[in-house]
Amino acid sequence: MNFLNRYWRRKMIGDIKHQKLLFFSIFFLCIFGVGSYVTLTMGYTNLYVSLDKIYEKTNFADVEINSHSDSWFNISKVDLFTKNYSLNNPGFNLVNYRLLTKSGYNSSMVTQENIRYQLTEGRAVGINWSLSSNERINDFIFEEGPSQFDNNSIYLEAHYAHSYDLHVNDSIQTRILGQKFNFTIRGIVYNPESLLVIPSRHDFLPTNRFGIIYLPLKSLQQYTNLTGFANNLIIEISPHLSDMEKESLISEFYTQLNAYTNNSFAPPTFQQYQVSNWAINMDLEEIQKIAIVLPILILGVASIAIFITLNRQVQSQRRIIGIASSLGYSPLDILVHYASFALILGLVGSIVGIVLGAILSGGITWIYAYFMNFPTIISIEVQFGVIFNGFVIGTLITFLSGVIPAIRANRLTPREALQGNIVIIKGKHSLFEKIFRIKSFRIRSTVPIRNFFRQKSRTIATVIAISASVMILVVSGAFNDSINHGISQQFTETSQYHISVNYEGFKFADLGLKDDINFISQLPGVVSVDPVLEMPSVINFNGKQREVLIRAWNSSNPSTHTFQWTSDTDQLLSKDGLVLTTGLARTLGVSTGAVISYGYPRIPYLTSALRAAEAIYNLWGGGERGRNKTIEYLNELITQNQDTLSFSREREEIVYRNKSITITGVTEEIWGSIVYATIPTLTKVLHIDDFKDSNISIDLSPCSKLILRIAEPNNLTLLEEIKSEISSMNEIRSITFGYDFQTSINITLTAFNVIVVIFILFACLLAGASIFTTIHINFQERSRESATMITLGLSDSEFLFIISIENFFQTLIGIIIGILPGLWLADWILSNALRLFYFSIKVSLQTWIILWGGVLLIVLISQIPAIIQGVKMDLAEVTKDISN
Amino acid sequence: MSALTLINLENVSKDYTMGEVEVNALSDLSLEIEKGKFVVLIGPSGTGKSTLLNLISAIDTPSNGRILIEGVDITFLTRKQRAQFRRHKIGFIFQFFNLIPTLTAVENVEFGLALVGVTDSSGNISYSTKDIHSTAMDWLDKVGLAHRARHFPSQMSGGEQQRVAIARALAKNPPIIIADEPTGNLDFRTGIKILKLMKELNKETQKTFVIATHNSQLAKIADFVISLQMGGVETYEQIPHDDLDNLIW
């Protein structure tokens, strides 16, 4: 084709050389758009592939089934059932039985961040170590140590080990059901179920606050007096089955198993809902969303830039087009020539973007894996599907944005093109002047205002480009500020505790709790002690259901917690209501005064009921009389509450159905799944008081943790002394310092800060490139009139002022337009990306100053090349140039 | 140099580079132009007409020699000083009119006036928008375009645009009006009208007009002719031919 001949090629190279900065800027935008798509898409795809590899290597369980809490099943009995079941169902590959218990650790170590943790929370997992590697489900990836156990050694989960710099042969003191054990670490391991260490969906703890140890099943059974028992079943299903077949198979298995074991098991948890996998997938989904939004923004700006650049190119080359037409080049040749600018930009930009994106995607994968402390099996692969998509999207968008100007060139007749008439811009009074009735002429205001409105499409394009950058900046700033403000408010104004003491289970008021409180209250430095009851629950509103953790205080106005009420109608904690956190209220769509339904999983109730019953049994002196009295109370409880309870002694099951309760307030806090109540409210709901005999005055108010305020919270020696005294008490699982917790969350959120910095850099580059492009084009298009103004005597500084004022207004409008969508996007990301937390949108004054100042500065810097060009132009030449 | 001399060029040369070729646009040119003259600069393309205009109007600087305007040497003025010089001393009329397309006719005139201000009845320089507007309207009236004051360049004919450009050049009361091919983009009749207007204004205001053209016929209407030829420069004074309607080009 003719357009490929060397003259056209030379012309094209010459045109590009002539406007190298401009074309480089557009080229950069193409690279940036395609590169961001490839980087992020390949990054998260790599992470998915890495996960698959880790899961495949470790034989990650397809399904997990737990027996109801505080109940265990006989392994031999269940094994007999599963073996029979697998004989009839060939897709049912493997079953492993495990014993899971709560545990606490006393590492006595100082973390790399100089934080001391003693008695941190955790989990002990007993596994059947005699199984061969082919038979093991949720197997380990060994970071350190041999793959063999002895009875006094444990494997420690790698995240926790890294936090405290623990290695093989280090010792760690563990508490299991109140008993202390000293173990030697035999190995540091990763496990697929704790790639992100999250205790449960409603209980987020930083990785250095929750340790998992793995030890032989028999040893753990021995420590817990549960020989022959387990409470966790993990299952591997044939990979050849479809998801639906798997679901059907497990559903059938679960039904039969529960029938066989008298409903001993909680519903199965499929792999996709396993808490670590669920949380990682949420993260990756967010990256996936960003991988769509960000390239759209950037490529959108790039296509606008290409459109206006080529439009300008066609306009300024009318004579060349005319000459070419006269010489016999067809309209198609001309169309192809101008469209090929966009095509080449798209092709080369896409290729470079793909290469850079592929390299950077490795970085994204690595950064994520590094911050999340993944095992080293990280897959960085070239994904041809992503490359193909990036190439097609990048090339197509840039090409299409160049086609319209090319068609315009193609439609010019030789006569029109050769006429070379001066292109006269249509002037008109701006809407702004009409509205404000501005009639007098002033160089410094009239000229910029008219220029601002002279080409609406150009102004809109510039404003869109600035808005896109502002959106990214607002998202980054709001993200950072909201998290910092949320954490700061939570730990300085809301949660005014300094030490938290966690019990193994529940402690009842007259059964030791009051003694503990008295003991702790008398310790030097302790100002107050608040008993707190925490228990999981499920709440429902209008069909929306959330798993939550109910946190209850003894008092309606606890000394260690100041609620941040969100409306005047909010009240203190009442005895008949719940207080929701903002995130939860928003997710459920409820506000103060709404009535929601809530229910308890059997877990806490059974624990409380049985412990209370046990307490009553003991109070009645045990023996036959005590047992009868206890059963009598339990039966009475059932009779009185038949509408809400069901009870079966044989199945040892007590289940509450959903009850209704009023929301009495909404407090602004960072927790995404916490609900507040009073202990009397929960005690009433749990019917614990029903265990009391009218002849015996006994307070069975339960408590699961104690919250302490200390006179000198910054006196670490004092804190350590108090901790040391408390750790000598019975039934204590863990003790944590408030400031440790805040620091831990800050460390966890470091990864987000990295993302914020990357976003800010992206935004600055995007703003700079897009603003440079539009300003450059604006200037080129007006070079004759600019030269005229300077020839007439306008000084350089006045010229600079006029240009700057116009750009300033464009920037101003761009910022204003970009702020709201930016805040909306930030809110959307904050409420979606961090589902365990909720951060209300806050933007600090500092961020606003940086945003406004930064964008204006970028604009000022971006206009420098155009202004230099303006100042240096040959006035005599340019005032005669009719193409401008 | 006589007391009437307004523009004085002494041994002025101008060389510049066009691509890789060195071009000698003007060579050792000396001439004097007196105040109030209607000067026509003629010569074929490439003889340095535009270069000479650019040097006189301080758009460009000479390679050698010196240029004095009203006795002041402008050869070595800084960029800022040259802008000030053009602002106060030169009125420009371009071949392609060069009106600011986003400004109305009167605003285009006001643009020039706003840079220098206007002299009020008490002889003071005023920058008030009212005074500037009033002066601009007076000048539009003088060029017969008061009724088109609120029109934009895109709404006016070429001749009208050039008249606005003349008003813009003269309104700020500069001693020199530089016009490079002022009729080059106009049809014959309109061109004649523009020349008539310029002549009239030259007589009325006693401003010095320096007009460059490739059309030797226009030399007939000049008081003073500078003929730039490949071989050298010829200057002569003459009694101008006032019957412009009978000019043929």
Image (cartoon, coloured by chain):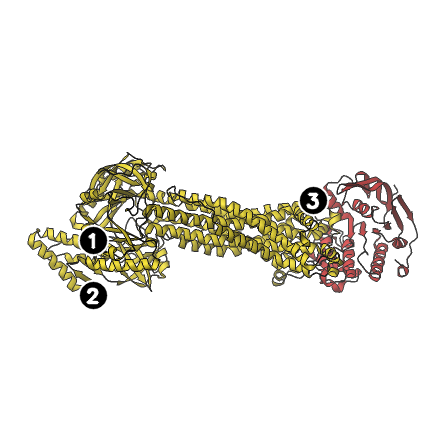
Chain colours: A yellow, B red
**Label 3: which secondary element:** helix
**Label 3 neighbourhood size at 10 Å, few (<14), some (14-19), many (20+)?**
few
**Label 1: which secondary element:** helix
Q: Quadrant of the N terminus of chain A?
A: bottom right
Residue topped by disc 3: A872
Q: Chain of mark 1?
A: A
A538 with respect to A2 (left or right): left
**Label 1 neighbourhood size at 10 Å, few (<14), some (14-19), many (20+)?**
some
Of the residues under marks 3 and 1, which one precedes in the sequence? 1
Q: Quadrant of residue B215?
A: bottom right
Name the front one of labels 1 and 2.
1
The amino acid beneath tag 3 is Lys
Residue topped by disc 2: A643
- CB atoms at circles 1 and 2 under 8 Å apart? no
Residue topped by disc 1: A78
A105 with respect to A493 (left or right): left
Name the front one of labels 3 and 1.
1
Q: Quadrant of residue A242?
A: bottom left
Q: Residue furthest top?
A: A169
- State the CA–CA distance, disc 3 to disc 1: 88 Å
- State the CA–CA distance, disc 3 to disc 2: 89 Å
- Residue occupying the point 38% across, 41% down: A376
Q: Residue furthest right?
A: B239
Q: Is residue B61 above or below residue A645?
A: above
The amino acid beneath tag 1 is Val
Of the residues under marks 3 and 2, which one precedes in the sequence? 2
Say the numbered circle drawn on residue A815. Answer: none
